[in-house]
Image (spheres, rainbow, N blue to C red):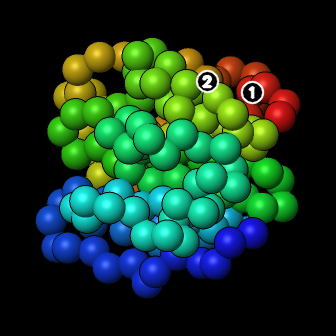
């Protein structure tokens, strides 16, 4: 696999704090072997190391506007976790699920869709419906997942 990502730096805004919680709390707790291959920030261009990691996994980097906030790759399980960090809008509904699926259509990794929220209370205030076959994680209750995928707890639905 290509070289590692540059050192991650986060701003102090609420959205950045949630993205940091995904990388520093969610990832090691639920997918300890994962590598953060993409973390959204305000940069206009991706680093060469990021482009290489994404290309290795078959991600359509030309669709950067459709990228999730965080992409984590479990090397051991070959899972690709697509995480949307939501502070006021942007949860993984059916439309977003389809966009992310298309973005990763060439990937051989199993896809896992995660909506990350600052708190469970915020979930009630968000418009739209959370898509089936997804997971919700909240930073205020970091050891728990809310499953919208019935038959599975954490894992891809379709085998790679």
Q: Earlier in the sequence, mark 1 or mark 2?
A: 2
Secondary element under disc 1, as helix, strand or loop, is loop
Say whether marks 1 and 2 touch (CB < 8 Å).
Answer: yes
Left or right: 96 as drawn, with respect to 13: right
How far apart are labels 1 and 2 at the CA level?
7 Å
Q: Identify the image quadrant of residue 29.
A: bottom right
Question: Which residue has dot 2 on it?
Answer: 133
**For the image shown, how many numbered marks are present on the structure?**
2
Instruction: Note whether 43 is above or below 69 in the view shown.
Output: below
Label 2: how many residues lie within 10 Å, few (<14), some (14-19) or many (20+)?
many
Q: How would you rate the neighbour count of disc 1 (Cα within 10 Å): few for under 14, some for 14-19, many for 20 or more?
A: some
- The N terminus: image quadrant: bottom right
Residue depicted at 42% across the width and 37% down the height: 63
Q: Is residue 147 left or right of residue 90?
A: right
- Mark drawn on residue 157: 1
| Residue 86 in the image: above or below residue 131 | below
Q: Give the residue at x 53% y 33%.
A: 103
């Amino acid at each position: 696999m290509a070289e590692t990502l540059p050192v991650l730096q986060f701003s102090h805004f609420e959205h950045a704090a949630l993205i940091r919680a995904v990388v520093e709390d969610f990832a090691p707790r639920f997918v300890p072997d994962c590598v953060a291959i993409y973390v959204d920030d305000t940069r206009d261009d991706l680093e060469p190391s990021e482009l290489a990691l994404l290309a290795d996994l078959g991600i359509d980097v030309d669709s950067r506007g459709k990228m999730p906030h965080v992409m984590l790759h479990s090397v051991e399980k070959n899972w690709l976790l697509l995480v949307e960090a939501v502070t006021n809008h942007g949860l993984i509904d059916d439309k977003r699920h389809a966009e992310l699926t298309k973005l990763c259509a060439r990937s051989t990794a199993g896809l896992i869709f995660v909506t990350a929220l600052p708190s469970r209370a915020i979930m009630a205030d968000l418009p739209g419906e959370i898509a089936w076959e997804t997971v919700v994680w909240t930073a205020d209750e970091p050891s728990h997942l809310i499953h919208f995928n019935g038959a599975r707890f954490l894992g891809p639905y379709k085998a790679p």
